[in-house]
Image (cartoon, rainbow, N blue to C red):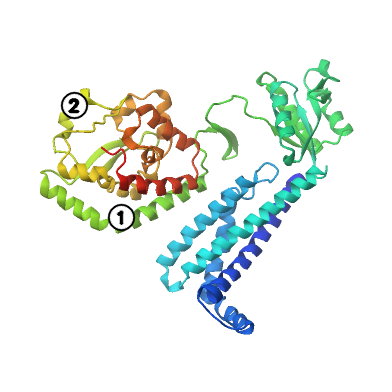
Amino acid sequence: MLRERAHLITNISTTVDVVIELIAFWLAHVIRNDFLMGRSMDFMDKLYVIEEKAFTSDDLWMLVIILPFSLFLFRQFGAYKSARLSTFAMVMGGYLSGLLAMMIILVLMHDIFQQLHISRLTTVIFLMVTGAILTIKERTAFFVMHHIRGMGFNFRNVLIIGSGPRALEVVSAIEEHPEWGLRVTGFADPDPARTGEEIQGHLVVGNVDDLSQILDENVVDEVIIAMPRSWFQLVEKVIRVCEISGIRAHLRFDLFNPRIAKPVFHDLFGFKLLSFETTSMHEVQLIFKRMFDAVLSLLLILFFSPILLIAALLIKWTSPGPVLFNQVRMGLNGRKFNMYKFRSMHQDAENQLEALKASNEMSGPVFKMAQDPRITPVGSIIRKFSIDELPQLFNVLKGDMSLVGPRPPIYKEVLEYQRKHRRRLSMRPGMTCIWQVSGRNDIGFEEWMELDLQYIDNWSFWLDMKLLFKTIPAVLAGKGAH
């Protein structure tokens, strides 16, 4: 029943979103044709223009693309998660992430399928209007639902299995968040001696062995199992009773309390697996990140091709040796790949490294030296503005790297890592990351590692966009580059 209600609410929300997008699509054409294009005409003329201009074959193609893709992206980015367990910011984050992804798709389609004549201005206006109306819709929905729950309506009664510290944490969380619409009925404890006790304002209404009777005598919508690991053998019994009674049961499965990894359920050919993942991305998000990397890296290669050519010629003319410097780096989960850079040092730089190690200015296994004598005059310029790293766009295009991610280390550095540092390899390495916009070589090794792990733990598509935009002034200023 509750699952059907949740599906019904999601379907209603999806239908409303379709209507909102249709309205926003119509308003985008009105704004573009009647206001921004400087048309002055009476009301009937405007209606004629709207009817004539707003629904061309190209526009209909745009609608065919927008409606299914936007709903899919909204769902994947979390906009349709239960409003009881989501904040307004979480829901709007899902919507805005989906709109940003949709904007990228539409811009790329405009460039690839130019025969469709999709208006970029109409696209931008449509996305802005959609975002504004969705914000009003969700803010109104949250206000109404919180007001209804504040009046004591639309609550779900929850029975807590267990009465120890884990169970009390659940009760405290429910009481601190009345907007969830949950109300604690009481506790059912494995210890029969605790029946009748009052704990944190709620009664222990019975023993786990009497769960069927408890469910019959009390109004219980859902059961939350929050017992310690030592009583894990009782979990299946509780679930069976709830299953027969038609009551939804939730298992608090943070039984092992990992510090970083997040527990996630997976289905492997019918086997239910409880996985502990250290990155927060789903497969769809990873695929979208990879698509974004491939398309943008290709566009950047084309855009920077004159600079790539000039840099290559200058390196060739001013210093003997190859134009590119290839170095084996460690990628995702320890995969080795050849990373490309413009050669900024003399040809025998690697052989001189041992003699310079005493001048290392970085802690840890990384070597950095501000006045490195191995750097050529042209190399100092291209390093200052990160031009030497532009060939890594080909690594991104190949899939060895991402535009944003932890910097790929060399194998010798990884051998000297502490165990906690190796988690940097759990995500595809990138050309820029938090360290790049936080001082680059001006920060120490430990801080560098912490910033990379911070990126992994808090990854989102918005964070990637933010770091890409912050990288531009950091590179132009040459801050922290040696």
Q: Nearer the viewer, residue 91 or 60?
A: 91
Residue 4 visible in the snapshot: no
**Circle 1 is placed at which residue position?**
301
**Circle 2 is placed at which residue position?**
356
Spot occupied by residue 10 in the image (x, y as percentages of width and height): 69, 52
Spot occupied by residue 364 in the image (x, y as percentages of width and height): 32, 24
> Against 387, is 419 above or below?
above
Horizontal relation, residue 73 to residue 428: left or right: right
Residue 467 visible in the snapshot: yes
Spot occupied by residue 461 in the image (x, y as percentages of width and height): 49, 47
Number of the label disc, if any, that sits on residue 150 = none
- 3D distance between C-alphas at marks 1 and 2: 35 Å
Q: Quadrant of residue 271?
A: top right
The furthest residue to the right: 217
- Residue type of the residue flagged with mark 2: Leu
Between discs 1 and 2, the one toward the N terminus: 1
Spot occupied by residue 72 in the image (x, y as percentages of width and height): 57, 55
Residue drawn at 63 percent across, 57 percent down: 134
The furthest residue to the top: 193
Query: Is label 1 in a helix, a strand or a loop?
Result: helix
- Residue type of the residue flagged with mark 1: Ile
Residue drawn at 79 percent across, 44 percent down: 149
